[in-house]
Structure formats: C-alpha cells, structure tokens
C-alpha cells in the first residue's frame, strides 16, 4: 500500500521511499484533522467514537497518544550485523575485511539517504506540521544509528580481530 492510498498505510518494505511518503502523508493529514475536543474524558471518548463512525483517520491520534503515554517501552534492539560479529573469528582476515568494508559502505549510504530526507524536511519540502516534525526526529535517529554502525564497521576492520 502507499501513503497516498485511501487507508493511508505505508509500504515499509521500501525503506528508502517509506520515509518520503510518510512525511508527505503526515503533512497532508495535518490539514485534515479536526480541532481537538474538550479534554474531559467523556467528551474525548465521544469525539473519538464520532470520528471513527465517520471513518476519519484523525481519530487514531487519540489512540496513539494513549499508547505513547502509558505502559512500559520495550527497549530491546536486535541488530543482526552486531549479532553476526560474534562469529567473525570464523572468517579469514581477507573475508572479514571485505565484509566490514561492505557493512561500512551500506550503513554510510543509508545514513546519506536519511540525511537527504532530513535536509528536504528542513527546507520545508514536507511542510511544518507536528507529524512531520516527529518524523524528522525519527529520521535523525536513523542517521545517527547508521553512522554509528558505519563507524563500528570501520573500527572493527582496523582492529586485528582475526589474530586473536
């Protein structure tokens, strides 16, 4: 599905395009939301139900806000390239060097794509809604994480791991 589809869903199988579509979609959606209702719980619930009955996507932000502000956050990260590093000792120095070069190049390229997205947002290409600002914050995390992984791969290559 696409961000501009009637359901508003994103195809996250296309990571390099998903961010662009998400920012554009969020900016379009920002102009479609109705004003927030009175903060009394009964009115919030009535607003949410009425919005859902009308089939409005805007009702979702009430559900998401509740999810963000309650409960514990699962901070588990599974970074497969780091998990695989436990077995670097099984590779020859040449294999390991080539592998780490590919890893560094991959993470640098991905960080560069995210940086382009961030620069477009900063220029105002996607508007200035709260949704696009939140996505900009997430894109910055992607830049920093991928740059850190590229730095790690370069450090690992410079470290003589094969000689033990």
Image (cartoon, rainbow, N blue to C red):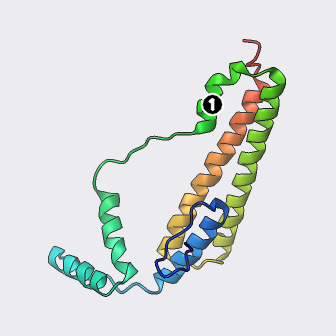
Closer to the camera, 72 or 12? 12
Residue under the image location 63 percent in, 60 percent down? 15
Disc 1 secondary structure class: helix
The image shows residue 60 at horizontal and vertical percentages of 35, 73
69, above or below 62, in the image: above
Q: Quadrant of the N terminus?
A: bottom right
Determine whether 9 is above or below 77 in the image.
below
Q: Name the quadrant containing residue 53.
A: bottom left
Q: Is residue 40 left or right of residue 159?
A: left
The residue that disc 1 covers is: 84
Which residue, as the protein is rendered here, is positioned at the far top? 164
Q: Is residue 14 visible?
A: yes
74 with respect to 80 (left or right): left
Q: Position of residue 13 (x, y in %)?
A: 60, 60
Question: Residue visible at 68% across and 71% down?
Answer: 120
Which residue is found at the position 35% from the left and 66% from the top?
64
Residue 27: x and y in percent read 53, 79
């Amino acid at each position: 599905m696409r961000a501009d589809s009637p359901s508003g869903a994103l195809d996250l199988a296309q990571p390099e395009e998903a961010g662009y579509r998400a920012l554009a979609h969020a900016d379009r959606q920002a102009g479609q939301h109705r004003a927030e209702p009175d903060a009394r719980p009964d009115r919030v619930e009535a607003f949410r139900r009425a919005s859902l009955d009308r089939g409005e996507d805007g009702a979702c932000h009430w559900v998401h806000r509740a999810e963000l502000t309650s409960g514990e956050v699962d901070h588990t990260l599974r970074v497969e390239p780091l998990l695989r590093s436990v077995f670097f000792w099984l590779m020859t120095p040449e294999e390991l060097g080539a592998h780490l070069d590919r890893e560094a190049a991959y993470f640098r390229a991905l960080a560069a794509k995210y940086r382009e997205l961030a620069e477009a947002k900063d220029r105002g290409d996607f508007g200035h809604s709260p949704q696009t600002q939140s996505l900009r914050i997430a894109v910055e995390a992607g830049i920093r994480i991928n740059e850190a992984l590229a730095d790690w791969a370069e450090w690992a290559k410079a470290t003589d791991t094969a000689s033990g």
